[in-house]
Image (cartoon, helix red, strand yellow):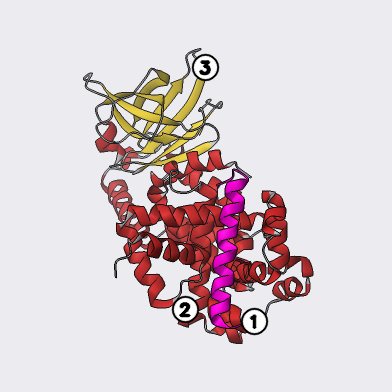
Amino acid sequence: MNYLLPERLERLSREYALGTLAGPARRRFERVLRQTPVGMRAVGAWQERLGGLAGAVPSMQPSESVWRRLEERLFPSARVAPRGPLQWLWGVLSVRALGGVLAGVFLCVALLRFQPGLIGMEPESDVLPQSYVGLLIDAAGKPTLLASSKRHGRLMTVKLLQPVAIPPGSVAQLWALPKDGSAAFPVGVVPGSGTGTVALADTSEKLFFNVSRLAVSIEAAPAKAGDKPSGDFVLSGHCVKLW
Amino acid sequence: MLTNEDLAALLPRVALGDRAAFEQVYRSACAHLLGVAFRILNNRERAEEVLQEAFMNVWHSAGGFDASVAGPMTWLINIVRNKAIDALRSGKTERASTLALDEEAMAVAADATQQPQALLERSLEKLRITGCMGELGAPQRQALALAYYRGMVHTEIAETLGAPLGTVKSWVKRGLDKLRACLEAAGIA
């Protein structure tokens, strides 16, 4: 069947968007849509027209468990909000993490047995996890963005200490500037306020080992690998490694 | 609730794996979207399942959002409606026909203002095209409302309204043609 005949495409798009196209015909048309931009546009136009019909549908607040289950399914390693005094511990201790903990305990026991002098050299509670940390300041020198990432982690946590104005349709793009002066590379998009998480392309150890500075520029769209900042940096600061 | 512009700015960030942006989109749109799914499924539990599945899609396919094809809210509504329609019709949810309506669905069923035709009238008022759409006969409007808000196919509408299938098909088509003409005349689409 030639789905691209204008009249046929119009009929199928209309019925697909409304929902009256059913059964195998609906599935077949979905497959066609994935390969035909003209079909996507025809369906999109009808969806836009019909979208107004949802305007008067009363809202219903979903239960919080919907969001919780989404988080659990999409980000299984995400720490679930503490529910009891020791609940957080079980959230953190996945089977793999438990293996790590046991290995750590073993190493610790071995060290204490053979190197007792190590005890007390540095109180453990004062030691920060090995990580990369960046504090970015604005043009007026005011601390604005705090970025941190565990050394072997693939996530960067970002906290805005004051809001950054991001014009509508633009994004705040975080860049890493290598210490050898080579070109900056994009890290991810950061929020204009509050806190956020940036998924890293690799572990921070690999990405930031040779990076001395981090900076943010305002871009029309999120930068891809190989892109360069289009304008001046609105924020910048040192990136340091904590041992 | 965030504006369409805000949502359009957040979705590219979701595509890059920005969880904070994803949560903002969810928090802002979830109540409206659950309402849409609930009209079709008539059961909160199943509507919430659909909402969850829809947002799994949003996370994985936010890169496919193209503002030049449809607005962000339209894009989200479309994902939820498609999921709800699939759930309504899929074999695994045959239980739908045997499942008792939950309390909320009973309340909605008993509330005249929540009936498909009332929802259509109020939506048309919001779009300011009530007068133009008024030129359409009541059966055409009813057929359109049952298809959109209840996810019914032509045969189900024919059964509900007690009209021949061919007639219902032409009512739905005329309803949509008129909607397009009215929106264009109002400069909306």
Q: Which residue lies furthest to the top in this view?
A: A140
Q: Is residue B66 magenta?
A: no
Between residue A176 and residue B84, name the one nearer to us: B84
> To which chain does the residue with label 1 belong?
B
Q: Does the magenta stretch include residue B172?
A: yes
- Sooner in the amino-acid sequence: mark 1 or mark 2: 2
Label number found at residue A142: 3
Disc 3 or disc 2, which is closer to the eye?
2
The dominant secondary structure in magenta is: helix
Give the labeled residue for mark 1: B160
Q: Going 44% across and 23% down the picture, which residue do you hit?
A: A136
How far apart, in angstroms, are the residues tagged by discs 3 and 2? Answer: 57 Å
Quarter-of-image position of residue B145 = bottom right
Q: Nearer the viewer, mark 1 or mark 3?
A: 1
What amino acid type is highlighted by mark number 1? Thr
Type of amino acid under label 3 = Lys
Comparing labels 1 and 2, the label whose residue is closer to the camera? 1
Q: Give the range drawn in magenta.
A: B162-189
Q: Please name whichever residue, A186 or B144, is drawn nearer the observer in this view of the structure.
A: B144
In this view of the protein, can residue A127 be seen by the observer? Answer: no
**Is B171 situated above or below A36?**
below
Number of residues whose C-alpha sits closer than 10 Å to that of mark 3, classed few (under 14), some (14–19) or many (20 or more):
few
